[in-house]
Amino acid sequence: MNMRLDYIKASPGGVKAFGGVYAYVMESGLEDVLIDLVYLRVSQINGCAYCLDIHTRDLIKKKVKPAKLALVQAWREAEPMFTDREKAALAWAESVTLVATTHVQDVDFNAAAVAFSEKELADLTMAISLMNAYNRLAISFRRTPDSCCA
């Protein structure tokens, strides 16, 4: 598959703006492994090979066990491997990412609100939104894993 457009070169200011949100999220106080697990799950839902590669590599560098990585997409069936906060974050990530289907129901919000403070939930939702945007860029312009860091 050939890359359609190098959006990083075409819009460096836009990419820099996204990078500012990314930096904010990473400094927000949310656990870095939790953020990367959410990024991985969002990228799985959206089918973004480029982002799946990056976030899998990030989690490996952070010493997340291979079994846990393999089961992110089936986290409900592999519950003991995930902390309560990770489970709440993954459920929220799914609901927010699939907004056209879920409409982010009150039950989903209420479950997330139990696990996270208001600031944490706002920051987590920004992280989910950011990854959805990154996925849309990479998928739309056909950015592949080998275009970065193979």
Image: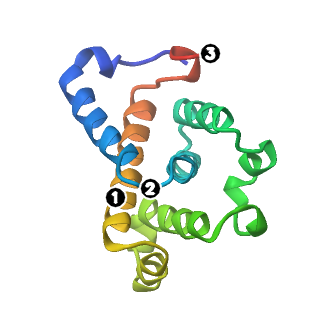
Where disc 1 sits, the SS reads helix
- Would you name the residue on which mark 1 appears? 123
- Circle nearer the N terminus (1, 3): 1
Where disc 2 sits, the SS reads loop
Amino acid type at image mark 1: Asp
- Circle nearer the N terminus (3, 2): 2
- Would you name the residue on which mark 2 appears? 30
- Distance CA(mark 1)–CA(mark 3): 30 Å
> Where the N terminus falls, by quadrant?
top right
Residue 113, percent across and down?
A: 42, 78
Image vertical order of residue 11 relative to residue 112, above or below: above
Pick out the residue farthest to the left. 13
Image vertical order of residue 52 relative to residue 9, above or below: below
Instruction: Tell whether 70 sits left or right of 42.
Output: right
Where disc 3 sits, the SS reads loop
The image quarter containing residue 110 is bottom left
> Image point 52% across, 64% down: which residue?
89
- Mark 3 or 2, which is nearer the eye? 2
Q: Residues within 10 Å of mark 1 (few under 14, many from 20)?
A: many
Amino acid type at image mark 3: Ala
> Where the C terminus falls, by quadrant?
top right
- Distance CA(mark 1)–CA(mark 2): 8 Å
- Distance CA(mark 3)–CA(mark 2): 28 Å
The image quarter containing residue 60 is top right
Q: How was this image coloured?
A: rainbow
Residue 7, label in figure:
none
Amino acid type at image mark 2: Leu
> Image point 31% across, 22% down: which residue?
7
Image vertical order of residue 122 relative to residue 102, above or below: above
